[in-house]
Amino acid sequence: MRILIAFTSLSGNTRDVARAVRTRCEALGHDVAWIDADVQTLAQACRDGAEHDLYVLGSWSSNGGRTPPEMKRFIAELVEAVGKPQCVAVFGTGETQWGEECYCGAVRRIAAFFGTRLPRLEIEQMPHGERDAERIRCWTDHLLESIESHPHADPARLIA
C-alpha cells in the first residue's frame, strides 16, 4: 500500500510519533512517503504524484487547540492536488494542562475537516515508554488492517 505521512512538530514530539508510525508501516512492507510540513511542500516530497492509499497526518496544537499554519498550508496543498482523500488518519501530541477543550485540538479539527471515520491517536506531550510505543503500534496496525481488509466497513468500530 502507498502511504503518505505528513506532520508538523514544534518540539519534536509529534515527529517522534510520526517516526514510529513510519517505522511500523515500512516494517510491514508498505511504501511510505515522508513529509515534514515545516520544511517541505507536497510537490517537493511527492515528485511521483500525490495519490496514495492512506494519508496519515500528524500535528501539535497551537493557541487554544488550533491547527498550526504549516499543517493548514499542507492540507490546502493536498486538497488542491487530490481533493479530500477518502482514507485519512490523524494523530498528534498535546498537553492536558491547557484544558481538555484544547488538548490535541488540531487532531480533532483535521479529522473533522476530512470527515474521517478512522480513529485518532492522541499522545500526552511526548511518546515515552513501552505503553506509548504499544499504543502507536496498535493504532498503526489497526489503520493498516482497516484499509486492507475492510475498505467499505466502519473501521472506527473495530477499536474497543
Image (tube, helix red, strand yellow):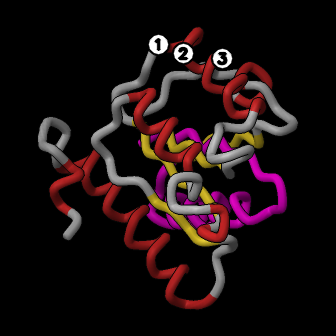
| Residue type, label 1 | Gly
Any magenta on residue 4? yes
| Residue type, label 2 | Val
For disc 1, the marked residue is 83
Any magenta on residue 6? yes
Going by the picture, which residue comes out furthest to the left? Answer: 153
Q: Are marks 1 and 2 in contact (CB under 8 Å)?
A: yes
**Residue 7: quadrant of the picture:** top right
Tell me, for residue 46, which label it has, or none: none
For disc 2, the marked residue is 79
Vertical relation: 142 (above or below) 84: below
For disc 3, the marked residue is 77
Residue at 55% x, 47% y is: 105
Q: Magenta segment range?
A: 1-30
Q: Quick one: quadrant of the N terminus?
A: top left
Give how far across and how far down residue 28 sits, in percent.
Answer: 44, 63
Q: Quick one: quadrant of the C terminus?
A: bottom left
Q: Residues within 10 Å of mark 2 (few under 14, many from 20)?
A: few
| Residue type, label 3 | Glu
In the image, 23 versus 156, the foreground residue is: 156
Mark 1 lies on a secondary structure that is loop
**Residue 128: quadrant of the picture:** bottom right
Q: Residues within 10 Å of mark 1 (few under 14, many from 20)?
A: few
